[in-house]
Amino acid sequence: MRRAAPEIDIRTAAEAGLAKLEDPEVLWIAAKSGRILVSQDRRTMPGHFARYTAVGASPGVVLLREGTHRNRDRRTRPDLERERC
């Protein structure tokens, strides 16, 4: 993500000192800091987020699919179009 949008202030949980915290606490810290949380935890994060936003405001959460990585496949759309033919 940093390479795609270097102008965006992106920090990992480890960089922010949040790696060992529970999800609800990470949500609270992100919200209080005015930050959008990006997570791959599609199993429990939606429920944590729903409970958090029932009582407080948050800039939001973006949920990514696990195992999805932009650099995994560097083929461009024209390359993929050619492969279909």
Image: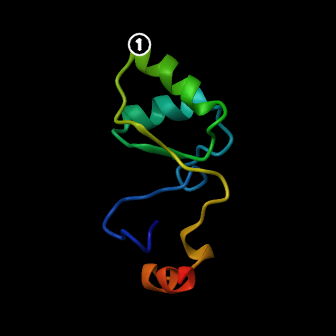
Count of numbered tags? 1
Q: Farthest residue toward the left?
A: 7
**Residue 20 drawn above or below residue 10:** above
Where residue 29 appears, x then y in whole percent? 47, 34
Q: Tell me what residue is drawn at x 65 percent, y 52 percent.
A: 66
Q: Nearer the viewer, residue 72 or 30?
A: 72
Q: Tell me what residue is drawn at x 39 percent, y 36 percent.
A: 60
The residue at which mark 1 appears reads as 55
Q: Tell me what residue is drawn at x 52 percent, y 80 percent.
A: 80
User: SS for tag 1?
Assistant: helix
Where residue 76 appears, x then y in whole percent? 47, 82
Q: Tell me what residue is drawn at x 50 percent, y 32 percent.
A: 27
Which coloring applies here?
rainbow
Q: Is residue 34 left or right of residue 47?
A: left
**Residue 78 drawn above or below residue 20:** below
Where residue 46 appears, x then y in whole percent? 55, 29
The image quadrant of residue 42 is top right
Amino acid found under the numbered disc labelled 1: Val
